[in-house]
Image (spheres, helix red, strand yellow):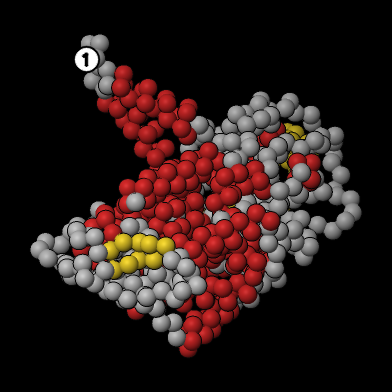
Amino acid sequence: MRALRRVSQGVFLALFTWLVLETGFSESPPQLLELFFDLDPLISLSTWLSARSLAAGSLLALLTLAATALLGRVFCGWICPLGTVHHIASRLRPKKRGRADAEGFSRWQRAKYFLLAALLVMSLFGGHWVGVFDPLSIMCRSLTTLAFPAAQYLVADGANAVYDADPRLGPLRLTLLTEPAYRFARDDVFRVNRQTFAGGLPVLAFFVLIVALNFVRPRFWCRYVCPLGGLLGLFSRRPALRLKNDKDACRNCGRCAKTCPAAAQPHEPGKWLPSECFVCWNCAAECRSDAVAFALESPLTPPAAGRVDLSRRATMAAGVGGVAALAGFRIAPETRGEQPFPSTLLRPPGARAEREFLQRCIQCGACMRVCPTNALHPSALEAGLEGLWTPRMVAKIGYCRQECTLCGQVCPTGAIEHLPLEEKKKVKVGLAAFDVSRCLPYAYGRECIVCEEHCPLSPKAIYVVPVEVTLRDGSKRVIKQPRVDADLCTGCGICEWSCLFQDQAAIRIYSANESRNAKNQPILPGPGIPPAAPPAEAAPPPAGPYGGGETTGAGNASPY
């Protein structure tokens, strides 16, 4: 059974990793990744409490709860990909020399239940912060913003380093070994240009911290913090699969307790803690006298087991703490949905109104992974602490492709709606504005219409106006100055992405005029400033790797 459990862990970890990887370059993202999130009862429950709605697929979470009620926390021990990472890290923990005492249950393990209470009360009052702590969200977010970009960087730069350092002695070449592997990784594994994520450092620090804690206690996160583990623990107090400890056969060697990653007390007859047990089968496999074993019993019969004491006072205090935390989050003006609106908080097209968006988003990062132009990045404090690690668009790094609706397709909770393509093209995520102190035709008298050439709309939202300017020597010349038609601009960001200024673009996208916010509408109905001359017809840009209308802006060349 222990060998079977290890195989199960490996299979589900590999499957989850492959699904996240496959999501990054698929025009039809695999639905199995969304199935993982649908099976997560914590996400389903918290989303229902905060948004007062539930997707049909989320009802699959009832299967997880039913399996937990019958078999115990098998999801934690056999399926959870983050739990497998913790399990591997725990195995790397240096073993103490000599006879080590068994680690018994600690009262601090109740912390995950109190964190669960705080998060659910926050959800009840409209604050959805479960995604920060949910193991599936953590795993998907970490793979997207950390593991895959780091692996791609190591492969590409490692191959370049070998190529540069190759001594090229006769027919022998180091690149004969490295180049095939590099081309395979580039063309068959990663397939897309290297992704980089602004604001990824806090994600990295968080992930490294929770993995490093396994060197303090085996599966530290699962024991003390994981709110999903707490929820499943509540449903596994009377499982049908129960641990039996034969007093007569037991030699009190403590081997079962030392190998238990959950401190579930398998060595104490009548005090085994089913709500803490991962059903990993370590204790039964390590017992040399066959005193410890799992057996099926009727769930109607109370088990001969211990119980975690959760005081009502501490649980109520945790709920009050959740309300207090939510109140603290919403002190910041940007979280109230009122003025001033954060100018750089650009949500992906299809994102719901900010309050409803935060009530649904689980910070999983799937939308960031699937974005073909690397436009979506985890937020820091642009949306306040409540919006931590939710997606935002950074136009200088990437832009929203006109023919793409992938972010809405992969969102597991509907925080980003899956809009029909024609409807998505009309959604405004922001508005472009020129910085005339930097724009070449305005500030320096130089010709430049790169932003107008890259605008994918028809008719274009950026047009040019011939203007006569006086040069330093007193001579005059006519220069085409670009302007923005606010009625047409959707804020896709390709103008900012393609601007020749690589430090700070001379044209930038701000959140003003976004479709999802009726209050953030500075552009009043009515005609705009008419152009002095008909807009120049520019040739369409050459097709890019993801469809028509995409070119590589200055300084934005592919790393390959």
- Say which of 251 and 175 sits in front: 251
Instruction: Please name the residue shown 49% across and 87% down the image.
Output: 312
Instruction: Please name the residue shown 26% across and 69% down the image.
Output: 246
Q: Is residue 292 left or right of residue 198?
A: left
Q: Is residue 238 left or right of residue 210?
A: right
Q: Amino acid at mark 1?
A: Leu
Instruction: Please name the residue shown 39% across and 32% down the image.
Output: 156
Q: Position of residue 493 (x, y in %)?
A: 65, 45
The image quadrant of residue 535 is: top right
- The answer to whether any part of residue 505 appears in the image is no
- The answer to whether any part of residue 154 appears in the image is yes
Q: Position of residue 153 (x, y in %)?
A: 40, 38
The residue sitting at the bottom extreme is: 313
Q: Is residue 168 left or right of residue 366?
A: left
- How many residues crowd mark 1 within 10 Å: few (<14), some (14–19), many (20+)? few
- Say which of 316 and 72 sits in front: 72
- Say which of 52 and 396 sits in front: 52
**What residue is disc 1 on?**
169
